[in-house]
Image (cartoon, grey):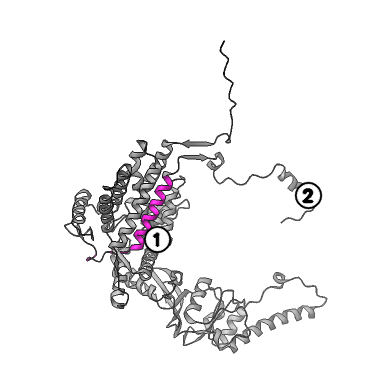
Amino acid sequence: MQRGLPMQPTVVLLKEGTDTSQGTPQLLSNISACLAVAETLSSTLGPRGMDKLIVNERGEAQITNDGATILKLLDIIHPAARTLVDIARAQDAEVGDGTTSVVLLAAQLLKEVRGYIEEGVSPHIITKGFRKASQLAIERIKDIQVVVDKSNPERFRSLLLKCASTSMSSKLIHSEKPFFSEMVVEAVQSLDPEDLDESLIGVKKIPGGGMQDSVLVRGVAFKKTFTYAGAEQQPKSFKNPRILSLNVELELKAEKDNAEVRVEAVSDYQAIVDAEWEIIYRKLEAIEKTGAKVVLSKLPIGDLATQWFADRDIFCAGRVPSADLRRVCQAVGGSMQSTCFDIGPEHLGTCGRFDERQIGGERYNVFEDCPKAKTCTLLLRGGAEQFIEEVERSLHDAIMVVKRAMKNGEVVAGGGAAEMNLSAYIRKHALQIPGKMQLIMTAFAKALEIIPRQICDNAGLDSTDILNKLRMRHAAGDKYYGVDVDGPEGTRDNLEAFVWEPSLVKVNAINSATEAACLILSVDETVKNPQSEQQNPGPRAPPGAAQRALRGRGRGVPRR
């Protein structure tokens, strides 16, 4: 008689309701999610890209074609697809431009190897092939990039203008490229060339007027702060004033807010009030003795101080935003003081001209002709608020591109020219490699063609025809030929046509896209906790905590 096999006990490792998906179907599902994200973004690429209107849960609408902004607003919840959101944000933070390209490239790499995954090729072979191809692409970029001579300022400025206008060509402001390119290059050149800190370029949005009414202030401008009645009696314009920046409150506080004092007689109370007035008057007199004509503070300046300054022809502004005050200190010199006493001439700044002027419906305090101006302010005008916000995003991309070009001075031809050259180079190299690696590297080469192909599709051109022409050109050695969305031919030498991009944008995009594709290919199982399916689950309270809290409150435990 055959003995029955011993029964294996069931081992439960995961909580009931936990969703586990694994193997090839899980990998293909992740690839499909990434392709869905890329499909949303694909129509925004290139000079003829479309914009997206995104409405959030509060009903606020935003119009944009910036890849990183769209992905941030879409609120993607699929865990694998969120990798694409991360690479777009990293590209935006690092180089400012190429956010749509990096997502399209990562998704296309996955699409090209999808067939190999279905046929059972190991993801590790694909990952190895991608990394090898990516390395080849970056080496090739270094061969085809053009290094611009920085010793000739006119020529170098012209390069920066070309880079800025190429960055803007796919944005909402492409019709005003010459105007905004000049503004962006001037703004970046006004920064300290050592660190080029773009946060020192202030951007103020003022609804109304046209785009051409936007101005660049070579100094600092900020919106008029909250003021009391005496502010209208203060002078609003100075030439060569001394400027004092404070982090001090010049306001009488109600006694109940400050401290609790027991007094026996009315005279004692009066003495406390008099002492407080004496303190603020001492501060104000100390400020007047410094000779400052413009007093700015991060903290409030009350009605008493405002009127006192007005009587002595001194301008003051309290509650100045800290970013604006930091830029004022950078521009006019001096330093921010946390006391009103022992302030010497070296602590004060100065500027050629200070005035308060009306711009649109707002009043702005403007500091111009600053001796240490390592900062500037862009005052943007436009019809609708969403429109001005998109202008700001477009200028941010252009500022980052110009900053990178100033630091490195190495450019490549844009409009898909660099990608076509890399594709031809990798395809040729792949033919010398035996085995499956040849197929993977050819797939990488084909994926690079998504950029010129999508630019053609978005411009309504015949992408197959133009890509064939470009392949022929690059095989013949014309390494700067790319897509021309305006001309009848559809192709042109984009280096001669001044469609230039910093090579760093391409290097970063290829690195990030390859890393993201390899990361997604290396995941073969997803385990989802059932609690994570709920909307905003909070931490679970320990049992009996609520009852203990109620009992404690009843015994006179003070409420926190």
Asked whether, in this view, residue 408 is left or right of residue 347, the answer is left
Asked whether, in this view, residue 535 is left or right of residue 204, the answer is right
Above or below, 545 relative to 275: above
Which quadrant does the C terminus fall into? bottom right
Above or below, 297 relative to 410: below
Asked whether, in this view, residue 471 is left or right of residue 351, the answer is left
Image coordinates for residue 270, horizontal then vertical, percent: 75, 80
**Taking the image as drawn, is residue 39 in sight?**
no
Which quadrant does the N terminus fall into? top right
Amino acid bearing label 2 = Gly
Image coordinates for residue 360, horizontal then vertical, percent: 40, 72
For label 1, the SS is helix
Q: Residue furthest top?
A: 1
Q: Residue furthest left?
A: 488
Asked whether, in this view, residue 8 is left or right of residue 55, the answer is right
Name the residue tied to disc 1: 386
Residue at 43% from the left image edge and 74% from the top image edge? 194
Label disc, if present, on residue 288 of the rendered structure: none
Q: Which residues are magenta?
A: 494-520
Q: Residue furthest right?
A: 264
Name the residue tied to disc 2: 554
Image coordinates for residue 99, horizontal then vertical, percent: 38, 57
For label 2, the SS is helix
| Residue 234 lies in the magenta stretch | no
Image coordinates for residue 298, horizontal then vertical, percent: 56, 74
Amino acid bearing label 1 = Gln
Q: Nearer the viewer, residue 164 or 263?
A: 164
Crowd band around label 1 with a 10 angstrom C-alpha radius: few (<14), some (14–19), many (20+): some
Secondary structure mostly taken by the magenta-highlighted segment of the chain: helix
C-alpha span from label 1 to label 2: 53 Å
Q: Nearer the viewer, residue 352 or 490?
A: 490
